[in-house]
Amino acid sequence: MLQHTARVGFIGAGNMAESLIAGLLHAKLVLPSHLIASDIDPAARDVISGKYHVATTAKNAEAADEADLLVLAVEPQVLDQVLNEIADILPDKTLIVSVAAGYPIARIARHLRGMKRKKIVRAMPNTPSAIREGVTAIAGDEEVPGDELATARSLFETIGHVVVVPERLLDAVTGLSGSGPAYVYILIEALADGGVKMGLPRQTAQLLAAQTVAGAARLVLSSGEHPALLKDRVASPGGTTIAGIHALELGQFRATVTSAVEAATTRSAELGLEHQ
């Protein structure tokens, strides 16, 4: 569990860092004075300091110095350089949490000059984290003790749900929940377009579509029932819903969504190979 007095540093002050900072402050999990974020972009620093009254810096070493928990929230293509910058000043106590997609724990450890892998955790959050409705998968290797995973978990629980998976499954997580919001946005757009085609005003159609998706998702989560059972309750014999489902099946809706997850997973694995 993340201690109230812990010092948390962020390297990178973009959207995910902002989501986590906002989540930590909303949960009152750490003191604002114990947070610091670094970024080369002054505009990003201004957002964090202005909205959350958190210290910011242009120097990554300042964010890493004395950190109990350090979040690597930069793009994977610049992470090599960042790790090289902080390798010599990073305290032994620091737990490293990386949200860089496709960047393996082993490579982080190498750049930190042999830092023990038990202090490194990878995470794959998604964009609904911005409103604390995200889901994050976290992974360490067999050397990461339970208390370190618990600390990482408590960080991401401030922005939504958390699951623990083996590192080898993070590509699949990326393809499903990491990329998944984009698939859902397309579904909402398509539902709204269908409503407009049938005569509904655009604003009304979009509200109906978005709330339908949100409500259906909440019912799956709250009931714990299989989506197929919930679907069957809507699909009356000879009714409107089964006619619509038939049209979806003709268009290979399920297969297309499954293929989207597979394609995104494959691409995530390819990116991982590039960052070995």
Image: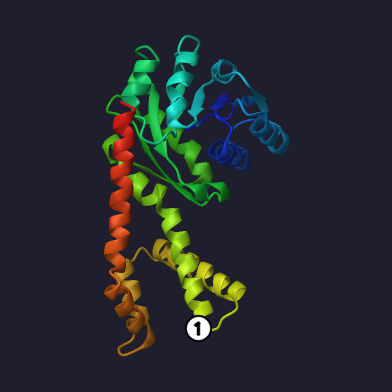
In-front residue for pair 25/59: 59
Q: Does 243 sit above or below residue 208? A: below
Q: Residue furthest top?
A: 88
Q: Give residue 141's position: percent from left, percent from top.
A: 29, 29
Quadrant where the C terminus lies? top left
Examine the rendered structure and indicate whether residue 218 appears above or below residue 35: below
Image height of 212 relative to 272, above or below: below
Q: Residues within 10 Å of mark 1 (few under 14, many from 20)?
A: few
Q: Name, please, the residue furthest toward the bottom.
A: 238
Name which residue type carries label 1.
Met
Residue at 56 percent across and 70 percent down: it is: 206
Q: Position of residue 104 (x, y in %)?
A: 33, 29
Quadrant of the rendered image containing residue 83: top left
Q: How is the image coloured?
A: rainbow
Q: In terms of secondary structure, where does tag 1 sit?
A: loop
**Residue 272 horizontal/vertical position (percent):** 32, 33
- Residue drawn at (51%, 72%), measured in percent from left and top? 192
Asked whether residue 165 appears in the rendered view, the answer is no
Q: Which residue is mark 1?
A: 198
Q: Is residue 172 left or right of residue 62?
A: left
Q: Residue at x 36, y 63 (%)?
A: 224
Q: Is residue 257 visible?
A: yes
> Viewer-proximal residue, 153 or 60?
60
Label count reads 1
State whether residue 247 is above or below residue 253.
below
- Residue 28's x, y, as percent? 62, 38
- Residue drawn where x is 29% and y is 58% of the image: 258
The answer to whether 239 appears left or right of 78 in the picture is left
Residue 34 location, quadrant: top right
Camera-side residue: 4 or 135? 135
